[in-house]
Image (cartoon, helix red, strand yellow):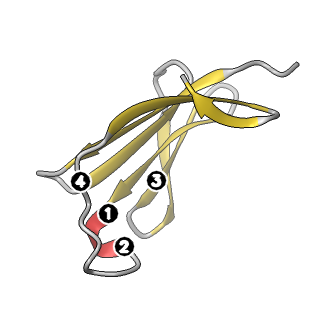
Amino acid sequence: MAERREVRVAYDRASDVLYVTFGVNVPAISVEVQEGVLARLNPDTKEMVGMTVIGLSDRTVEQSVAVEPVRGSLTYDAGGLVPA
């Protein structure tokens, strides 16, 4: 069975930024993969350890959908995502 890793999600309403971290939070470099979307990479292994989305509320499909503060954890493995 593949290793299970926690996925943490946090939204900063004041900054309108979504943070997603895969596994343990480690030092990382950020690479902009699309305007306002940053992939966080472990500088040694180049493994993606997280992502940041700047201006999340501008990216919602419908403007009537409100972006609410969120904080949560999931784990993932080869079988998919499950609550932590």
Front tag of 4 and 3: 4
Q: Is residue 55 visible?
A: no
Observer able to see residue 31: yes
Q: Residues within 10 Å of mark 4 (few under 14, many from 20)?
A: few
| Spatial CA span between label 3 and label 1 | 12 Å
Tag 1: residue type?
Leu
Residue shown at 83%/22% (left/top)?
A: 2
Calculate the distance from the C-alpha at mark 2 to the C-alpha at mark 3. 14 Å
Residue 45 position, x and y percent, is 70, 28
Q: Which residue is mark 1?
A: 56
Which is nearer the N-term, disc 2 or disc 3?
Answer: 3
Check contact, mark 4 vs mark 1: CB within 8 A.
Answer: no
**Nearer mark to the viewer, of 2 and 4:** 4
Tell me whether the residue at label 1 lies in contact with that at label 2, contact meaning CB atoms closer than 8 angstroms.
yes
How busy is the neighbourhood of tag 3: few (under 14 within 10 Å), some, or many (20 plus)?
A: some
Q: What residue is shown at x 39% (from left), y 32% (from top)? A: 72
Callout 4 secondary element: loop
| Circle nearer the viewer, 2 or 3 | 2
Q: CA distance from mark 4 to mark 1?
A: 11 Å
Could you tell whether 34 is left or right of 36 in the image?
right
Gap between marks 2 and 4 measured at Cα = 14 Å
Q: Which residue is mark 3?
A: 38
Q: What is the CA distance from the residue labelled 4 to the residue labelled 3?
A: 21 Å
Residue 67 locus on image (x, y percent): 26, 60
Going by the image, does 69 lie left or right of 34? left
Whichever of callouts 3 and 1 sits on the residue coming sooner in the sequence is: 3
**27 shown above or below 19:** above
Query: How far across and down, in percent of the image, does residue 84 sit?
Result: 54, 22
Q: What residue did someone put label 4 on?
A: 68
Residue wearing tag 2: 59
